[in-house]
Amino acid sequence: MNKPRKFIAVLIFGSTLLNVAGIATAQTMSVMIDDLTTTEVQAAIDDGKTTAIYYVGGTHQSGPAVVLGKHNLLATRLARRVAETLGNALAYPPNPYAPAGDPIEKTGHMRFAGTISVSSETLAAVSRDVAVSALAVGFTDVVMLGDHGETQEVIREVATAMDAEWRSKGGRVFFIPVYEEGENRMREILSALDVPTNRTTPIDDASEMMAIASDNRWIRPERLEDDIAAVASAELGRQFIDGKVEVAVARIRELVR
């Protein structure tokens, strides 16, 4: 009589281990589609993760203290956190290229080494193709966001045109003004610290880079100007990033039904 009981206990214990492993895998599954296999992406869509997050970053100069890829570093983290918070979304790899000046005439950021600039037409074409790709494989909603000022109007126009085109087919495309609204929150925080408006951008860039890496790998603290170094901090950076996530999630939940 004892043997059957032991045998049953082993089976139950084994089943429990398998279930726990399955739950752990589900809980730790990345929301970034480039971390997943095709099978995992399809399973996620079938399970209700039908919102695609498309974030545009940018690669351009940020002075002597902040790395050129700050927008891309932030866009990756913001896209992940937004998707995780929503719970029904996956995030595409952020687009690292945005308009940043004329490379021939050397205007805007193109006056400085390392900057990469694409035309507004190129950004619009790529953004449209990413959205079509998402809608074609089963996502029902595509959300476009950007962490670079010159990007905003381009992806707004793309989203508006694509939403009109795809709505009758069951797809929606939205632009979320997280850059504008997140910047407004940042300015409110810095205004309370008596920071002049013309110093808000270098302070938020430095603070956000401090926040995303405790070893300051994305910033050169010794090269910060004194008034920026006196205010910038990882804690401020976390507040700025949290504000952008909150704005994005709230807006998306208003739009995606």
Image (cartoon, rainbow, N blue to C red):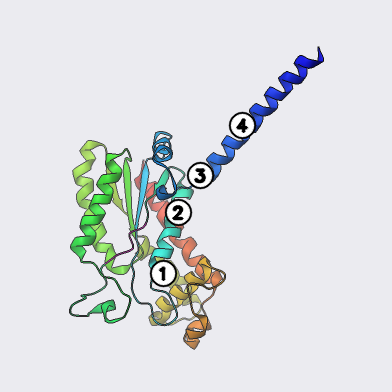
The numbered dot on residue 18 is 4
The amino acid sitting under disc 4 is Leu
Stretch in magenta: 94-98
First in sequence, mark 1 or 4: give its number: 4
Rendering coords of residue 143 (x, y %) = 33, 50
The amino acid sitting under disc 1 is Lys
Whether residues under marks 2 and 3 lie with C-beta atoms below 8 angstroms apart, the answer is no
- Nearer to us of marks 1 and 4 is 4
Mark 1 crowd level (few <14, some 14–19, many ≥20, 10 Å Cα): many
The numbered dot on residue 29 is 3
The numbered dot on residue 80 is 2
Mark 4 crowd level (few <14, some 14–19, many ≥20, 10 Å Cα): few
- Examine the rendered structure and indicate whether residue 89 appears above or below residue 203: above
User: How far apart are labels 1 and 4 at the CA level?
Assistant: 41 Å
The numbered dot on residue 70 is 1
Please tell me whether mark 4 sits on a helix, a strand or a loop: helix
First in sequence, mark 2 or 3: give its number: 3
The numbered dot on residue 111 is none
